[in-house]
Amino acid sequence: MSIPAALFIIVLGFVTATLSGVFGMAGGLVLMGGLVLVLPVSAAFVTHGILQLVANGWRAILHAKHVRWDIVGWYALASAVAGAAVALISLVPSKPVLYLLMGLVPGLLWLPQRLINLDAARPPQAFASGLLVTGLNLTAGVAGPLLDLFFVRTSLTRHAIVATKAATQVFAHLAKIVVYGTPLLTSSSHDMPPWWMFALAVPLSMAGTVVGGRILDRMNDVDFKKWTKWIVTGIGVIYLLQAAQLFARGAG
């Protein structure tokens, strides 16, 4: 990997951790898209998993008093089941397909809320969210908008939503690291970024989480939900355009 590409990932890790610290999911979507620009798909999945594991884990620690641990417990159990199932399939999407999936995922935010009767506070639905969100995370690289559907009708505050979602995503990204990282460890390829990049990116990702948390404190619940929807949708449109260009060029 070239030094400019590594520096790009380091800066991207800080910016997207800040974004996730505010909105709880937009950062992961941006990070995955950026990583696929400079890395093979499998390496991008593992790198994304590592950086997001740190960002989400640190965010959950910072807001630990707001985490609903009962939701996290059911999610973690289902996440393990989903990870084992996807590992058996051994499916790695191409870059055009990955951008297409990432572009379509934000459309979930526009489903009419009156038709959605999901609530992560209910144990069966917390388990279902773990299965569905982790499964989508392992195929599309991101699943924030799907996870968000399980929190639309909860009575949780913005801090509780961000904190609980962060804690659940620790398990989703851990599954991503294991499923895509294990084959890389057993191969002779050198697709992964160098260790020094992670040594710099990890603390910067943690710093971005702190910055994002301070911005979150200055927002209200109404603005939080409104801006999340529009920002994630805009990112999705960009990814759909990128997918169209790659399919038109016949890129693999």
Image: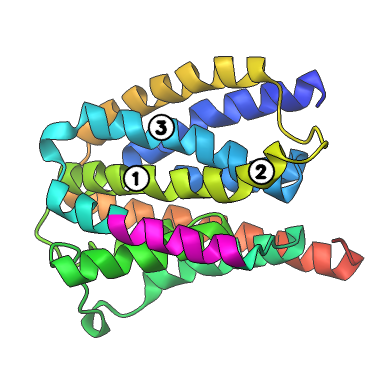
Residue 118 in the image: state x and y as whole percent.
22, 73
Select label 2 or label 1 by which is in front: 2
Select label 1 or label 3 by which is in front: 3
- Decide: few, some or many residues near mark 1? Use Cα within 10 Å; few <14, some 14-19, many ≥20: many
236 in the magenta segment: no
Residue type at mark 3 is: Ala
Residue 181 in the image: state x and y as whole percent.
62, 42
Residue type at mark 1 is: Phe
Residue type at mark 2 is: Ala
Q: Earlier in the sequence, mark 3 or mark 2?
A: 2
Please tell me which residue lies in front, 208 or 71: 71
Contact between marks 1 and 3 (CB within 8 A): the answer is: no
Residue 64 in the image: state x and y as whole percent.
17, 33
Label 1 to label 3, Cα distance in Å? 13 Å
Q: Can you identify the residue that label 3 sits on?
A: 55
Give the SS element for disc 1. Answer: helix
Q: Quadrant of the C terminus?
A: bottom right
- Which quadrant holds residue 59? top left
Please tell me which residue lies in front, 41 or 116: 41
Q: Earlier in the sequence, mark 2 or mark 1?
A: 1
Find the magenta span and give its range: 77-88
Give the SS element for disc 2. Answer: helix
Q: Can you identify the residue that label 1 sits on?
A: 23
Label 3 to label 2, Cα distance in Å? 16 Å
Q: Tell me if residue 195 comes above or below residue 76 in the rendering.
A: above
Which label number is shown at residue 37?
none
Q: Can you identify the residue that label 2 sits on?
A: 44
User: Residue at the spot x=37%, y=28% of the render?
Assistant: 209
